[in-house]
Image: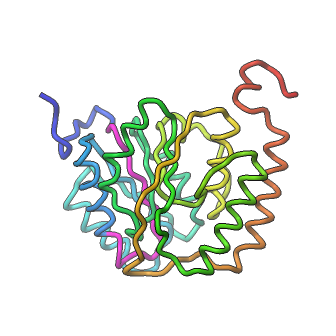
């Protein structure tokens, strides 16, 4: 008889890892962790939740300690003593994950993780599922800036991706843990999708509902745009010089 979702043998890796980066999310983190386990239970899959506490200065660490008492070894926490950035938090979460599948989302509760039950079947024929936000619940300026950047990035990397920065993405574990990601900030979403596209991995896009924040605030600002454009130019140049997965397999760098 298969073990229920809440029982994971210590020697058996979970089927699904849910990675949650968190920075000053005291108002969201408890719900985010509980909703992650509840979403996995609907699949059902054995599941671990990996929270990367990226130098939070509020009560996030204390709340995570309390949650550890509730969920035990199914909840793992990676602590950064200082804030290292969203990209570093995600990379550390991916590398700490053990699951055959790895999903990530933010800790702000803007997605219904119950939708994982409709997304995981797509992994039978794909390496990655990229969510895109339906009726995005963000201020108009952020949506305007994000839409322009999305179109520019898709053009630069020769792909057609509807919502690069949507933090509802599911990967095969060996794929995401094997990507040579090095972006320290929010540009990591663009980097990982560009590398997946150029590497020839199979991906599909899936619409997911988006909900407004009810606590905390986003750390993304319009003032981040110039730095992000510089990151885009650097990544475009770097990828043009790197062999992709197919070229590496054939030994060609042309």
In the rendered structure, the answer to whether residue 212 lies left or right of residue 140 reads left
Relative height, residue 213 to residue 54 (above, below): below
Extreme right residue here? 254
Q: Nearer the viewer, residue 2 or 197?
A: 197
Number of marks in the rendered image: 0
Q: How is the image coloured?
A: rainbow
Q: Quadrant of the N terminus?
A: top left
Position of residue 28 measured from the top left corner of the image (x, y, whole percent): 35, 74
The range drawn in magenta is 14-29
In the rendered structure, the answer to whether residue 215 lies left or right of residue 9 reads right
Position of residue 57 measured from the top left corner of the image (x, y, whole percent): 46, 79
Q: Nearer the viewer, residue 16 or 42?
A: 42
Extreme left residue here? 1
Relative height, residue 43 to residue 218 (above, below): above
Position of residue 199 measured from the top left corner of the image (x, y, whole percent): 67, 35
Residue appearing at x 60%, y 73% in the figure: 143
Magenta stretch encompasses residue 89: no
Q: Nearer the viewer, residue 210 or 8?
A: 210
Residue appearing at x 22%, y 56% in the figure: 71
Magenta stretch encompasses residue 15: yes
Residue appearing at x 46%, y 63% in the figure: 134
Question: Which quadrant of the structure image shows residue 165?
Answer: bottom right
Question: Which quadrant of the structure image shows residue 111?
Answer: bottom left
Relative height, residue 85 to residue 127 (above, below): below
Position of residue 188 measured from the top left corner of the image (x, y, whole percent): 63, 56
């Amino acid at each position: 008889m298969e073990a229920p979702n809440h029982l994971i043998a210590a020697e058996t890796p979970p089927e699904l890892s849910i990675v949650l980066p968190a920075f000053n999310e005291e108002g969201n983190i408890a719900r985010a962790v509980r909703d992650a386990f509840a979403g996995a239970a609907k699949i059902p899959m054995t599941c671990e939740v990996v929270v990367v506490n990226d130098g939070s200065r509020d009560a996030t660490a204390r709340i995570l300690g309390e949650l550890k008492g509730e969920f035990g070894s199914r909840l793992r926490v990676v602590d950064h003593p200082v804030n290292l950035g969203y990209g570093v938090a995600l990379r550390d979460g991916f590398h700490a994950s053990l699951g055959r599948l790895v999903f990530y989302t933010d800790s702000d509760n803007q997605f219904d993780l119950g939708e994982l039950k409709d997304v995981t079947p797509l992994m039978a024929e794909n390496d990655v599922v990229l969510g895109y936000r339906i009726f995005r619940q963000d201020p108009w300026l952020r949506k305007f800036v994000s839409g322009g950047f999305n179109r520019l990035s898709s053009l630069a990397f020769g792909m057609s991706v509807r919502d690069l920065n949507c933090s509802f993405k599911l990967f095969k574990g060996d794929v995401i843990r094997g990507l040579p990601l090095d972006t320290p900030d929010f540009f990591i979403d663009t980097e990982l999708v560009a590398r997946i596209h150029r590497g020839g991995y199979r991906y599909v896009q899936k619409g997911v509902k988006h909900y407004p924040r009810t606590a905390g605030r986003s750390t993304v600002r319009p003032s981040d745009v110039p730095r992000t454009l510089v990151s885009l130019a650097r990544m475009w140049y770097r990828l043009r010089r790197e062999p992709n997965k197919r070229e590496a397999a054939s030994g060609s760098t042309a």
